[in-house]
Image: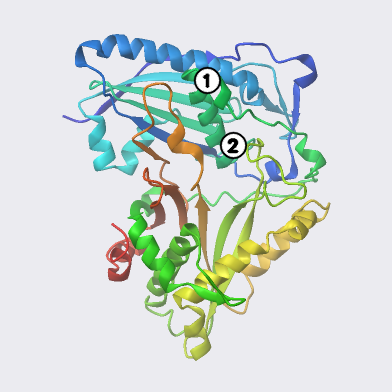
């Protein structure tokens, strides 16, 4: 029988205490202005370890805990219960609330989805389509946070969360879920809290008149999302092959650098093997990495500061097919170094420039040069790392999640990296065209390190 997800209730959850009048306006920053008009999705799986006879009692009590703790958590994250006003310049913190759905999941067992995940099925556990255009989605214009709690017949629970990218990044989302879970289990001393700053003083808003934000969203029928798991031992092998001597000290890449460069390398080789590509004089490969800049600022911001507080590092690899230097530039250790150096450039000086009034215009000019130089074909590949976020610490009182993941992305050449539960491995969710994925997923070098 086919799995059935039946939404049995929908309501609005408001903060347990009204937001004070002096906090009713939450200003958005320049970084919020240019954030994608999407929701950031996360899906948390909790298996049921209780007795079967207690399933109904446990289910009812768990749902009450989830709802009540959500209401309490919204008092600290009060902008999420508000609405964006004045052409995306501020959030009116009016306590209108967040969408909360409860669903029953029939004809399947939770462990099936952990052991053999289907990316299309994952979307059914979410309260909304996270990547629809704001103009196509009535929900987007109204709600900044939506949650769906899915209860399986076996007693397992899957919590799907969608948070508007207009007000928060993945780091903010993970901290919210962590604090929500800590509130649910009564661990008030472990709540990180949410520093809500007047971010426009750090990243002043700019005039976006005449600017059309590129969505980058493609027809989902043309794209495929696949999960590739890099175990800790395999990542250790990759790191050994890409270490370097720096100031007489052996330096090794981070897990994220090693895996990102490896995936980028496998994709570049795939692209170079395409008919007609080898004949081109020059091909530029741009690898982008989203960089959390909270700790890179002077003075540094708290790691749990709420908002969009990231920028993008860009590494370039230029391949001239008949040129030995081009072949050298595409070698794995070289790519590791290029990614590392690109991220290192996101320093305090870079951030000061980002905070200047001309930052947005300069940023767009830089991207325009990369994408269309007129001298070469440019192929973009994008990475976003959720590693080291406290996703597996989200214990609502009945244990930590068995699995945490995200939803498939309707974007071409995008990779989201998430920790495995053990903490030393990485799950890479890779989004490509169907044609590219057909070659990528049977790449022998890739499969030697990923499963």
The residue at 33%/64% (across/down) is 440
Residue 47 location (% of width, % of height): 29, 28
Nearest to the eye among marks 2 and 1: give it. Answer: 1
The residue at 46%/19% (across/down) is 185
Residue 32 location (% of width, % of height): 68, 41
How has the structure been colored for display? rainbow
- Taking the image as shown, residue 229 lies to the left or right of residue 394, namely left
The dot on residue 418 is none
Residue 277 visible in the picture: yes
Give 228 or 295, whichever is nearer the viewer.
295
Quadrant including the N terminus = top left
Give 8 or 110, whichever is nearer the viewer.
110
The residue at 32%/63% (across/down) is 449
Residue 102 location (% of width, % of height): 39, 18
Give 202 or 392, whichever is nearer the viewer.
392
Which residue lies under the disc numbered 1?
A: 183
Quadrant including the C terminus = bottom left
- Near mark 2 (Cα within 10 A), the count class, few <14, some 14-19 or many ≥20, is many
Vertical arrangement, residue 162 with respect to residue 280, above or below = above
- Taking the image as shown, residue 450 lies to the left or right of residue 303, namely left
Which residue lies under the disc numbered 2?
A: 172
Residue 318 location (% of width, % of height): 55, 78
Vertical arrangement, residue 340 with respect to residue 3, above or below = below
| Inter-mark Cα distance, 2 to 1 | 16 Å
């Amino acid at each position: 029988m086919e799995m059935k997800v039946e939404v049995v209730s929908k309501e609005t959850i408001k903060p347990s205490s009204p937001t004070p009048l002096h906090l009713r306006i939450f200003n958005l920053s320049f970084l919020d202005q240019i954030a994608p008009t999407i929701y950031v999705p996360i899906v948390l799986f909790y298996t049921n370890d209780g007795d079967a006879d207690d399933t109904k009692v446990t289910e009812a009590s768990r749902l009450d805990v989830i709802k009540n703790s959500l209401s309490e958590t919204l008092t600290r994250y009060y902008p999420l219960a508000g609405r964006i006003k004045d052409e995306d310049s501020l959030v009116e913190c009016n306590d209108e609330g967040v969408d909360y759905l409860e669903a029953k999941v029939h004809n399947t067992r939770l462990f099936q989805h952990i052991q053999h995940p289907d990316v299309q099925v994952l979307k059914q556990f979410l309260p909304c389509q996270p990547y629809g255009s704001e103009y196509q989605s009535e929900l987007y214009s109204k709600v900044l946070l939506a949650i769906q709690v899915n209860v399986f017949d076996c007693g397992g629970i899957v919590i799907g969360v969608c948070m508007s990218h207009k007000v928060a990044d993945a780091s903010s989302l993970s901290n919210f879920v962590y604090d929500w879970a800590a509130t649910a289990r009564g661990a008030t001393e472990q709540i990180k809290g949410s520093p809500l700053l007047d971010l426009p003083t750090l990243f002043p808003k700019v005039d976006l008149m005449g600017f059309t934000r590129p969505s980058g969203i493609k027809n989902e029928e043309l794209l495929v999302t696949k999960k590739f798991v890099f175990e800790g031992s395999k990542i250790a092998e990759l790191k050994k092959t890409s270490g370097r001597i720096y100031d007489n000290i052996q330096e090794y890449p981070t897990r994220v650098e090693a895996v990102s460069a490896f995936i980028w390398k496998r994709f570049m080789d795939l692209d170079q093997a395409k008919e007609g590509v080898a004949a081109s004089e020059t091909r530029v490969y741009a690898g982008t990495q989203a960089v959390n800049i909270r700790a890179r600022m002077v003075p540094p911001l708290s790691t749990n500061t709420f908002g969009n507080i990231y920028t993008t590092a860009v590494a370039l690899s230029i391949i001239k097919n008949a040129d030995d230097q081009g072949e050298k530039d595409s070698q794995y250790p070289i790519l590791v170094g290029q990614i590392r150096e690109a991220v290192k450039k996101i320093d305090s000086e870079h951030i000061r420039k980002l905070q200047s009034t001309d930052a947005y215009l300069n940023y767009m000019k830089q991207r325009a040069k990369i994408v269309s130089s007129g001298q070469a074909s440019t192929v973009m590949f994008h990475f976003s790392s959720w590693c080291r976020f406290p996703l597996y610490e989200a214990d609502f009182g009945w244990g930590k999640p068995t699995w945490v993941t995200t939803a498939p992305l309707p974007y071409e050449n995008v990779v989201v990296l998430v920790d495995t539960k053990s903490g030393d491995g990485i799950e890479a969710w890779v989004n490509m065209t169907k044609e590219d994925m057909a070659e990528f997923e049977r790449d022998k070098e890739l499969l030697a390190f990923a499963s």
